[in-house]
Image: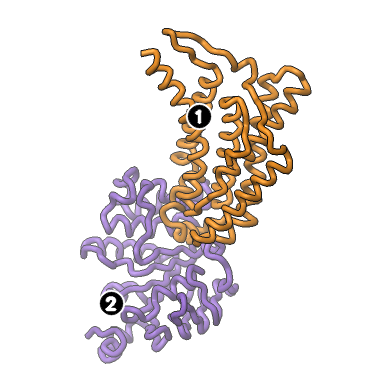
Chain colours: A orange, B purple
Amino acid sequence: MELHLTLLFNGLATGMLIFLLAAGLSLIFGLMSVLNFAHGALFMFGAYAGTWMYLLFGGAAGDYSILAFGMGLIGAIVTGIVLGYTVERTTVRQVYGNHLRQILITTGVMLVVGELVMLIWGSNLISVQPPPAISGFTELMNVRFHHYRIFIIGFGLLVLISLLLMLKKSKIGLVVRAGVENKEMVQALGINVRKIFTFVFVFGTTLACVGGFLWGPFQGQINRIWG
Amino acid sequence: MTMLQVRNIETYIQEFHILQGVEFDVPEQEVTVLLGRNGAGKTTTMRSIMGLNPATKGDILFQGESIRELPPHVIAKKGIGYVPEDQDIFSDLTVQENLRVAKRKENEKTEEREKWILELFPDLKIAYTRKGGNLSGGQKQMLSIARALVNETPLLLIDEPSKGLAPIMVEKVMEALNVIKQTTTVLLVEQNFRMASKIGERFYILDEGRTVHHGQMRQLEEDKELRQKYLGIA
């Protein structure tokens, strides 16, 4: 029983992190039919950028507080927005509708982002731990429920609910769903599909970057081979 | 005043030269009908006006302004509503959501227009929360027209509204178009000559991508030879 509960709990936490990565990839492919081979690299870049911010603020204060962790999270979000916007505008936009070119160009982006990470942060592993406020564990029925994993499950659920609400209830969500079905008709209704594409790509990249940042303390380190 | 002027446009789809000189005027507050056999270029003309298959030559003027090189979303925002041949409603969205996607602004004006549309198409009111994919062919056509009208639309392009519909639904759509034409200029593509002649005021006949004849609908109703020659109907 303890084993099953432990496995279920850990599986849920890992699943939530994979969900953050996969949701972006799925949105980008679903709406824009873009095969984004660089998604893993963007995930890794988000992990490095967010962790760098977390360690910078945590190290400066000397306590790796939840506030520093929050700064890391904001860093990952900002990185996702900037990176997603840049990649979409400079590369992906040129190859809409051509899968072969998408594979080639996003593989190129993957290599460039990987090299950028090495250039900025070097090739060594970076150790990172969750802030003390969400470290440790609570033991119930002989099962250890790690607080950071509880946090990840909660965060993932929050993202999931927000995503569902956005897609089901908001105007932009409806436009995204309509665009998945018929891009041409959406344009004929007066909606700039390119802007929607950019939004979705940026959103998907941001989810990947946030997922990357949260993955670091989960693993205890961030690694260049993630991308 | 002329709402839309199509001036000698030429359009390619891949390497195929589909439109080779289409020309016509759509006067304000009238229903102009594009007629022609299958493959004459009627749908491509509509798509060229909307910028979905942009014309490579000639010009398209909407309220005096050239729209030939504009992207489809800008053309739509200028006030051209488009009802495509296959309706193209969003089947995963409900009727309400389909209308919401189409609204460029969510304000009192569009709410009022939606109310008016639902009065015009009571079937849509009944199916308001039903998904587009679960509607009947007639309801899909009504929704497609409703979606094009939910914003202020000086010009409505409708491509074959009677296609594939049961006669009772054709009657309902026709009734609605008779109301719509009182406030909106309409460019209609229609194979059903009976319907076209009841609604339309003037016609243009396309053949092999060119405008080959035009006149008042009354003339065409009386000219059996012309109908036989270009439309293949007695």
Circle on res. B78: none
Reading the image, the residue beneath label 1 is: A156
Residue A47 position (above or below residue A26):
above
Q: Residue at x 50, y 50 (%)?
A: B109
Name the residue: 54% across, 76% down. B60
What kind of residue is marked 1?
Gly
Q: Position of residue A29 (x, y in %)?
A: 47, 50
- Circle 2 SS class: helix
Q: Residue B24: tell me if it is visible.
A: yes
Relative image position of residue B8 (x, y in whole percent): 51, 84
Q: From the viewer's perspective, is A148 left or right of A123? A: left
Disc 2/disc 1 C-alpha distance (Å)? 58 Å
> Looking at this rendering, what residue extends furthest in the right direction?
A60
The relative height of residue A215 versus residue A6 in the rendered view (above or below) is below
Q: Quadrant of residue B210?
A: bottom left
Instruction: Give residue A190's position: percent from left, percent from top.
Output: 52, 58
- Towards the viewer: B37 or A227: A227
B98 over B68 or under it: above or below = above
Give the chain letter at badge 1. Answer: A
Q: Quadrant of the C terminus of chain B?
A: bottom left
From the image, tell me which residue sits under label 2.
B193
The reply to whether residue A195 is in sight is no
Q: Provide residue A75's location: percent of width, then percent of height.
A: 68, 34
Residue drawn at x 37%, y 18% is A4
